[in-house]
């Protein structure tokens, strides 16, 4: 349904014909677009809806709003936001005996242009003339600029031209874009070709191990672990998991505090070919039980002490599941999302390319494992040869600790929800975090006050308002 408002004269009684006064009322009409009708069919539906509405035109609009009691907002009108007025009455003629009456154009007056107002989002007036229809579209300046309203008006004209050219065509085939707009949509905004070949998380990690095995992969609690050492530890976990039956299309839960063991375990799962299910230790037992059952996880990793063993990396395809992440559950029940390797790799490659990240970067890992941002924090550095700087368990709640860690370890990339970012900016020692080059903030409203404060405290860093790693992947 598409509700619009229209005006009626309100003079249904012949006794009102010669009475001076304002009797205009507002009607709300809905247009039924279901079933993809042709324009001819749509005209028939509008005619029936219009006649039905006119039978109730004596009901005051204010009374209708009062009875329906819709949710009110100061930002919009109730029931409809677009007004359509059709002026199809003959011009009034003033007939005075012995007097010839005519019209005269108003003289031009110097000064600002005449102000046109509307109480609706859009107000379309159409007038019948001897040469056809003449229209005027007025838009609310709170929502539209003049260029946008002009574009909408041009699209109305194109839609009318299209339906006149073929009134029997389904209305879904009516194209309201001109050539330039269509080109912008197809080859401008949607030109997403990047020239990247499909890849997997363990595949990209293995490339970094081979490229520079002695580079620092992880720094945690003052201990540095190289790429070669991290690969060896994860390989032992992967071999153990394979003996337990883990592999492609299976889910392994990882339930460990943030630290080196959590990283080793997660890498071991994907190297075994399975998908990892991160379990935050702070989650209620009922939710954990639900997630394990819902995801079908038969193995839970709560320790990474695995015996030495020779192992061969499992064949992992780009379409294979990489991890399962659960939403907060807007309906009360958490929803699991299966993210394949190709999707998460695409996101990580975009991050690295768009922000200019490379092996010299140092990425802060501090988001709880059950939140999807933690996947970005964990795998972004390990797939580009950078260093992962790990915050201690619970450290994500301590702005002074995080500021010190960023400063001491030379962190260049970090992600914060706006509420934590605000707390970080209130922490005096954050001004010492001069190594930061990229800060991402999402998951909540990022206010202009936080933005402005950010550039006061960290003038050399860049701030990105982001959202939805799972949705984007």
Image (cartoon, grey):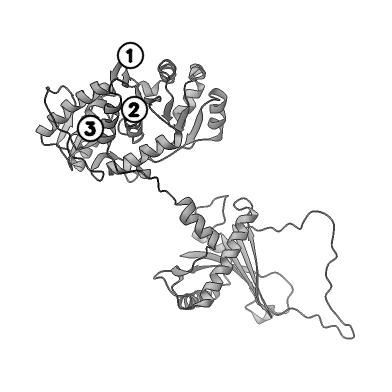
Residue 385, numbered circle:
2
Q: Residue furthest front?
A: 211
Q: Which residue lies furthest to the top in this view?
A: 222
- Image quadrant where residue 305 sits: top left
Q: Mark 1 points at which residue?
A: 222
Residue 165: % across, % down = 52, 77
Foreground pick, 8 / 364: 364
Q: Which residue lies furthest to the bottom in this view?
A: 97
Q: Mark 3 points at which residue?
A: 285
- Residue 345 vs 302, above or below: the answer is below
Mark closest to the chain's N terminus, 2 or 3: 3
For discs 2 and 3, the disc positioned in front in the rendered view: 2
**Lateral position of residue 137 relative to residue 190, left or right:** right
- Residue 165 vs 283, above or below: the answer is below
Residue 465: % across, % down = 48, 37
Query: What residue is at 17 percent from the left and 34 percent from the top?
Result: 313
- Image quadrant where residue 370 sits: top left
């Amino acid at each position: 349904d598409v509700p619009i408002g229209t005006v009626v004269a309100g003079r249904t009684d012949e006794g009102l014909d010669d009475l001076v006064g304002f009797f205009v009322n507002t009607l709300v009409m809905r247009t039924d677009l279901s079933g993809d009708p042709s324009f001819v069919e749509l005209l028939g539906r509008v005619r029936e809806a219009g006649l039905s509405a006119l039978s109730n035109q004596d009901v005051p609009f204010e009374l209708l709003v009062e009875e329906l009691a819709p949710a009110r907002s100061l930002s919009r009108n109730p029931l409809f936001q677009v007004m359509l007025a059709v002026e199809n009455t003959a011009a009034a003629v003033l007939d005075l005996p012995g007097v010839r009456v005519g019209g005269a154009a108003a003289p031009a007056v110097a000064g600002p242009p005449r102000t046109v107002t509307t109480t609706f989002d859009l107000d379309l007036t159409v007038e019948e003339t001897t040469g056809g229809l003449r229209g005027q579209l007025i838009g609310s300046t709170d929502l539209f600029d003049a260029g946008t309203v002009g574009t909408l008006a041009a699209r109305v004209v194109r839609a009318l031209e299209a339906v006149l050219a073929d009134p029997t065509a389904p209305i879904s085939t009516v194209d309201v874009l001109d050539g330039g707009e269509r080109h912008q949509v197809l080859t401008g905004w949607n030109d997403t070709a990047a020239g990247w070949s499909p890849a997997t998380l363990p595949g990209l990690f293995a490339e970094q191990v081979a490229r520079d095995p002695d580079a620092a992969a992880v720094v945690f609690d003052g201990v540095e672990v190289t790429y070669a050492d991290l690969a060896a530890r994860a390989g032992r976990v992967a071999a153990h998991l394979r003996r337990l039956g883990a592999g492609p299309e299976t889910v392994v839960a990882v339930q460990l505090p943030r630290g080196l063991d959590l990283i080793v375990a997660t890498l071991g799962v994907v190297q075994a070919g399975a998908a990892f299910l991160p379990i935050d230790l702070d989650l209620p037992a009922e939710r954990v039980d639900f997630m394990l059952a819902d995801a079908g996880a038969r193995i839970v990793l709560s320790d990474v002490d695995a015996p030495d063993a020779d192992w061969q990396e499992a064949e992992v395809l780009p379409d294979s599941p990489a991890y399962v992440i659960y939403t907060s559950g807007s309906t009360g029940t958490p929803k699991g999302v299966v993210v394949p390797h190709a999707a998460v790799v695409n996101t990580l490659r975009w991050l690295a390319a768009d922000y200019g990240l490379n092996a010299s970067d140092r990425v802060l890992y501090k988001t709880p494992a059950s939140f999807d941002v933690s996947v970005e924090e964990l795998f972004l550095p390990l797939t580009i040869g950078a260093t992962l700087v790990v915050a201690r368990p619970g450290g994500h709640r301590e702005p002074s600790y995080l500021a010190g860690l960023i400063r001491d370890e030379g962190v260049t990339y970090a992600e914060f929800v706006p509420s934590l970012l605000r707390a970080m900016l209130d922490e005096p020692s954050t001004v010492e975090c001069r190594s930061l080059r990229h800060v991402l903030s999402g998951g909540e409203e990022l206010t202009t006050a936080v933005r402005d404060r950010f550039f006061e405290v960290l003038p050399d860093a860049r701030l990105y308002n982001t959202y939805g790693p799972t949705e984007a992947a």
